[in-house]
Image (cartoon, grey):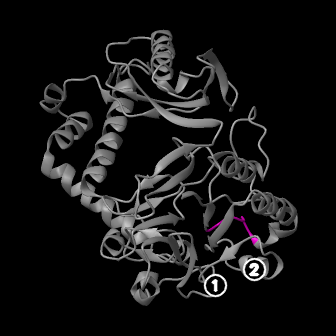
Amino acid sequence: MKILACSDIHLGRIPQVGEDEQQSGQSSWNAVVNTAIQLGVDALVLVGDVVEQEHAWLSVYQPLLTGLEQLKAAGVKVVAVGGNHDYHVFPRLAQESDAITLLGLGGTWESFDLGPVRFIGWSFPSSHTRINPLKEFDASLLEGATLSLGLLHTDVGVLTSVYAPTQPSDFTSSTVGLWMLGHIHKPDRVANSNAYYCGSPFALDKSEMGRHGAWLLQTIANSTWDEPQFINLCPYRYERLSVDISGLRDLEAIRSKVTSSARDYVSTLQEPSNLYLVPVFVGTLSPSVDLSLFFGSLEEREKLLFEQQKSKVYLVSKFVDETELEVDLVSLAEGQGPVALLARMLLDEDEMASLAHKYQSLDRESYNSSAFGLLERTVLDTDEAIKRSNQAGRKLLKAMLVQIEGGL
């Protein structure tokens, strides 16, 4: 049996990506439908947030139903659960179309059998829910099942969240054979568990890096699951491009290094794609080089850099500076004044750890503000906090040295 699994289509939302892509609010849905039919799958599972919002319903209703009818005509059964964006849309759809089976409406666990597989799902009862749905899992739904596939829209790995928080251990300790999850837009396996985030079929904005598509699930002799296979669907891709600029003394040399690094990266790709690269500068940087001038007078949009191996490569008009200042901190620390004081701080591991701890505290406290209460909580670990503190300190040191040297 073959099943295509996807989530977070956000039908009605136009991807905020490169101007040359010309995507519509239904492009990714069309790609999912066509792929399911071309692969000849037995079922398509939709793990929440298929529709962007209630206010988009009228504009997406027709393309959604058209796709469902195409799948029905091709013999593809559609099984779905609701997420935080479309929890109110699916009950209506369940009454109006027999081309889709919706599980767990109202926040209750429900099952459905198709061939050798028992589908088990839970849908959001409202736009926000702080409960862990797996704490209320009904194990009796698995009685008599040979193979089981769990469907859940959830925020994994956080203790508190308004998006049905769960932990990786919840899935490994369950008796469900395989889980497909929605909510996080990056496709990935959850730790070493039997759960996979589908990710969004298309990148919805420039922050959604890497590959995007759906997962192909296959049974082996109708008794066990084969390893899930990722199917790329998105015709464009955003990636960070690491560029070591150690020893480079002028912007032209840095620009040439970016181009050569981009060509090297493209040569590693297995599938052609419109590639949008964000330069990430690493290594050491001379205080005399001003990276803010790297793009010159380019407009705030992507620029076509070159074409290679059927891929168009664009440079995103922003960069990330992760360089370290090309200075002798030990020598600077032996001096007097603010520069020496900052250099000593950067060399002192205990001082940097203390600064990182303060940064973590401020980060945690920000979630206590009523203005940010509904934001998804993320935990800033100590290593990342130290890294950010060090980067901030080195940027300040560079600015101070440039000022001392006469504004170079």
Most distant residue in the front direction:
221
How dense is the environment of label 1, judged by Cα within 10 Å: few (below 14), some, or many (20 and up)? many
Residue depicted at x 34% and y 68%: 168
Amino acid under disc 1 = Leu
Compare residues 306 and 378 and report the one nearer the observer.
306
Query: Element type at marker 1?
Result: loop
Instruction: Kindly identify the residue that appears in the image at 34 percent across and 19 percent down.
Output: 286
The answer to whether 408 appears left or right of 97 in the picture is: left
Closer to the camera in the image, 369 or 108: 108
Asked if disc 1 and disc 2 are in contact, CB closer than 8 Å, the reply is yes
Q: Is residue 51 magenta?
A: yes
Q: Position of residue 331 (x, y in %)?
A: 14, 25
Q: Is residue 270 visible?
A: yes
Image position of 196 with respect to 85: above or below: above
Dominant secondary-structure state across the stretch colored magenta: loop
Residue for badge 2? 94
Quadrant where the N terminus is found in the figure: bottom right
Residue 286 falls within the magenta-colored stretch: no
Determine if residue 368 is in view: no
Residue 71 location (% of width, % of height): 75, 59
Measured as percent of width and height from the top left, residue 126 is found at 63, 83
Q: Nearer the viewer, residue 283 or 156?
A: 156
Q: Quadrant of residue 156?
A: bottom left
**Range shown magenta:** 48-53
Q: Secondary structure at mark 2?
A: helix
In the image, residue 177 sits, relative to residue 31, either above or below, namely below
Using the image, tell me which numbered label, if any, was put on residue 290.
none
Q: Residue at x 63, y 71 (%)?
A: 80
Q: Amino acid at mark 2?
A: Ala
Q: Which residue is mark 1?
A: 105
Q: Quadrant of the C terminus?
A: top left
| Spot occupied by residue 369 in the image (x, y as percentages of width and height) | 49, 75
